[in-house]
Image: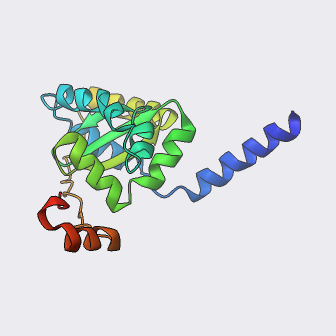
Amino acid sequence: KQWYQRRVRAQKEKNSETSTNDFSKEFIINLLIQTNKEEMPKAKSALDEVGLYDKDTMTSTYSSLLSKMSIISKGHNFILLTSRDNFAVENLKKEVIKNSFLLFINKVFNQELNVFVISYEEFNEVKNAYSKLASSKKLPKPKKINKPKIKEEEPTDAELIGANLFGELFSK
């Protein structure tokens, strides 16, 4: 059992060193400043319905990871997520840079969004820093978050063959 615990601890340390998108407190505070409270209920509703995509083999991994997340902030071009499940957080951090994930997010939220993911511990640290800045009226001016660049997916060979054989019947 001790061997296993040491291995898990070593893997967590390795993952934290190689995480693909760790953000500064200032960056996360910038996102919190830009929270659009009117968009939050709609975003939470969309996230609650992400389980509808579990049956689709192309999106089931994404929907499974997203179903473990909570929305911290939703702004004009972004969404900030967290979870108490550090494994899901680390796995989602690896997915958010993929074009197919951004297309899935576009489908779920009906909007092109950057997805930022932080651990629950990181969220608590940032929340405390944000509260201190807000209470002392020293919140910085928001910095614009641009829309993500989503590339059109090229059709696969199978899709091209199907379109050639069946024409409009095969197209989406």
Q: Which of 62 and 44 is in front in this view?
A: 62
Which color scheme did the rendering employ for the protein?
rainbow
In this rendering, is residue 9 above or below 136? Answer: below
Q: Where is residue 103 in the image (x, y as percent from the top left)?
A: 26, 54
Question: Which residue is situated farthest in the right direction here?
Answer: 2
Residue located at (24% from left, 63% from top): 150
Q: Is residue 104 shown above or below 48?
A: below
Above or below, 137 against 89 in this view is above
**Image quadrant assignment for residue 55:** top left
Query: Position of 43 compared to 132: left or right?
Result: left
Left or right of 150 in this view: 23: right
In the image, what residue occupies the spot 87% across and 35% down? 2
Left of 140 or right of it: where is 57? right
**Residue at left offset 16%, top offset 43%:** 110
Label tally: 0
Residue 30 visible, this angle = yes
The answer to whether residue 133 of the structure is visible from this angle is no
Measuring from the top left, give residue 131's x and y in whole percent. 34, 28
Quadrant hosting residue 9: top right
Q: Quadrant of the C terminus?
A: bottom left
Q: In this view, does 104 lie to the left or right of 89?
A: left
On screen, residue 26 above or below 2: below
Residue 139 in the image, given as x and y percentages of width and height: 25, 39
In x, y percent, where is residue 94?
A: 47, 55
- Identify the residue shown where x is 44% and y is 32%: 68
Which quarter of the image is occupied by the N terminus? top right
